[in-house]
Amino acid sequence: MLDLKNEGDNRGHEYSVHAVDKNLHAILNKVQHAAVPEAFGHDFLRDLGFSSSNDRSIIKVFKYLGLLDTSGRPQSAYKEFVDHTKTKKVLAERLHAAFDDLYTANKKAHEQSVDELKGWFKSKTGKGDAVALKIASTFKSLATFADFSQARGPAPKKEEEKVESHEEDKVQRIRLSTDQLGLVYRFEIHLPDTQNVDTFRAIFKAMREELIQ
């Protein structure tokens, strides 16, 4: 199992990607036809017929993809995933979100070979060939199960989350005015280089809590 922090990335991105054996696709198939459990753990995997210690890696994979929370409880994306008519599309969307930096580098990363992906992960993480290969192989195995032809693009941002993009930086200008005092305040925020909408939401939520009291 691999829990890798990308030391070369100033965003502190963590690749919680885990090497799963040949049962990966079999597990994905079984999960989509099973009832949604209260918690996705070792017992649930055994009930599905997967008792190997390697099979347990899928739990961390699902957490990394946002299908489960940190305690193993299924999230809304998991409930969509088990709808067999949406399974492959939902997986494609979760891969886009979880590997946003990879897709920033290549919009069709899922079409790359394992060797090409290994090179990217090795450069990004600074790890050796063996570790980079495990990450690349896991991503590629998930990608071959997914269907990217109907996957939704990034969710649209709310009005207050719109960002003006520039080649060298991204600046968000928020203007607050009061009719009584006739004052205008201008703030400039240098945002991290990420396509992850949740990052922007967290920043603006914190601003609202500090400024609008």
Image: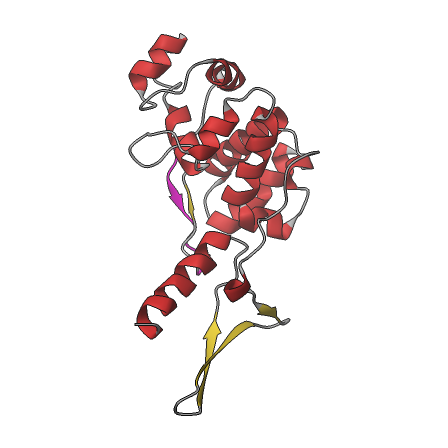
Q: Is residue 35 above or below residue 97?
A: above
Does 57 lie within the magenta span? no
Q: Check the picture and name the quadrant holding the N terminus.
A: top left
Q: Position of residue 10 (x, y in %)?
A: 44, 61
Q: Nearer the viewer, residue 91 or 201?
A: 201
Residue 200, placed above or below residue 55: below
Q: Is residue 52 visible?
A: no
* Segment tinted magenta in the rendering: 1-10
- Taking 59 as reference, is 81 left or right? right
Split into 4 quadrants, where in the image is the C terminus?
Answer: bottom left
Residue 113 position in % (x across, y down)? 66, 34
Query: Against 186, is 83 above or below?
Result: above
The residue sitting at 46% across, 74% down in the picture is: 189
Q: Count the marks: how many?
A: 0
Q: Residue at x 43, y 51 (%)?
A: 13
Q: Mark yes or no: residue 105 visible.
A: yes
Residue 8 falls within the magenta-colored stretch: yes
Name the image quarter holding residue 204: bottom left
| Residue depicted at x 29% and y 14% | 43
Residue nearest the observer in this picture, 177 or 100? 177
The residue drawn where x is 57% and y is 19% is 84
Q: Main secondary structure of the magenta part?
A: loop
Q: Position of residue 89 (x, y in %)?
A: 61, 31
Q: Position of residue 75 (x, y in %)?
A: 40, 33
The answer to which quarter of the image holds residue 177 is bottom left
* Relative to 83, residue 176 above or below: below
